[in-house]
Amino acid sequence: MKRILLTLMAVVLLQGCSLREPMPAEHDPKTPTLTPRASTYYDLLNMPRPRGKLMAVVYGFRDQTGQYKPTPASSFSTSVTQGAASMLMDALSASGWFMVLEREGLQNLLTERKIIRASQKKPNTPVNIQAELPPLQAANLMLEGGITAYDTNVRSGGEGARYLGIDIAREYRVDQVTVNLRAVDVRSGQVLANVMTSKTIYSVARSAGVFKFIEFKKLLEAEAGYTTNEPAQLCVLSAIEAAVGHLLAQGIERRMWAVADGSDSATVDKYLTQYQQPE
């Protein structure tokens, strides 16, 4: 009887694992891998080619949520990544529409240029730094914004069943992150386009157990389960990529920037259809 119950419990757990969640962490490969990308990244890769690239700068993309991880995890660790500016520059480069100029580390860049100029006055100067430094390039667009909201427990629920001392349960929770991205004309300061996108963060827990007397005064009690949390930083990255896609679609629709002749605009149409209000 004991073997039958344990076998049944193992089958239930295996069925739960095969639905949608990955294998537990102890079975994950130990070698580093490329960051997994969502469909928004491939939308950027499939954007139509521009008639000319836009010179853009990003001075920062701050965490404006004010949210910290709940205790006892940490009272000082933030709920969202502080590297959103790097994510934004990666999304801009992936789209193929922007020539991104370094501004987040501008002070470091200026310091290094000063070192090069000082080295040019010394004897035995390396050939690669003997030429006069050209001026830094100026940008036409400045991209501003930030992570504006992180809402926890937007939706939660679950289901379960118990029969003859054997039970199985599933619980889930949905959080949500929101980002804002706007394109600003450097010459006039006018906001040319403004986008807000949201992405859900999904967490699910599965468990199974047995509580049953197999003989007189002999109780069998066992429990197993696992929890899967969608990485918050990947959700922020996906929201930023979607914001870049919508920003490009808005600019193309308003004819602020142009598509190269013969380019496929199916991805742009996909983003523009999201603005249509249901009847």
Image (cartoon, rainbow, N blue to C red):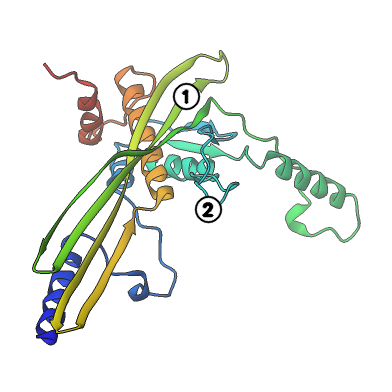
Q: Position of residue 17 (x, y in %)?
A: 20, 67
The mark found on residue 183 in the picture is 1
Residue type at tag 1: Ala
Which badge, 2 or 1, comes first in the chain's sequence?
A: 2
Q: Position of residue 55 (x, y in %)?
A: 52, 31
Q: What's the CA distance linking mark 2 and mark 1?
A: 39 Å
Where 23 sits versus 70, above or below?
A: below
* Mark 2 crowdedness (10 Å alpha carbons): few <14, some 14-19, many ≥20: few
Quadrant of the image for the C terminus? top left
Name the residue: 45% across, 43% down.
Answer: 93
Name the residue: 31% across, 27% down.
Answer: 249
Question: Residue 50, can we see it?
Answer: no
Residue type at tag 2: Pro
Where 76 sits versus 62, above or below?
A: below
Question: Residue 206, can we see it?
Answer: yes
Q: Position of residue 149 (x, y in %)?
A: 44, 32
Q: 140 and 246: which one is in front?
A: 246
The mark found on residue 72 in the picture is 2
Q: Position of residue 232 (x, y in %)?
A: 41, 48
Where 182 sits versus 147, above or below?
A: above
**171 horizontally vs 279: left or right:** right
Q: How many marks?
A: 2
Q: 143 and 199: which one is in front?
A: 199
As helix, strand or loop, the secondary structure at mark 1 comes to: strand
Where 164 sits versus 81, above or below?
A: below
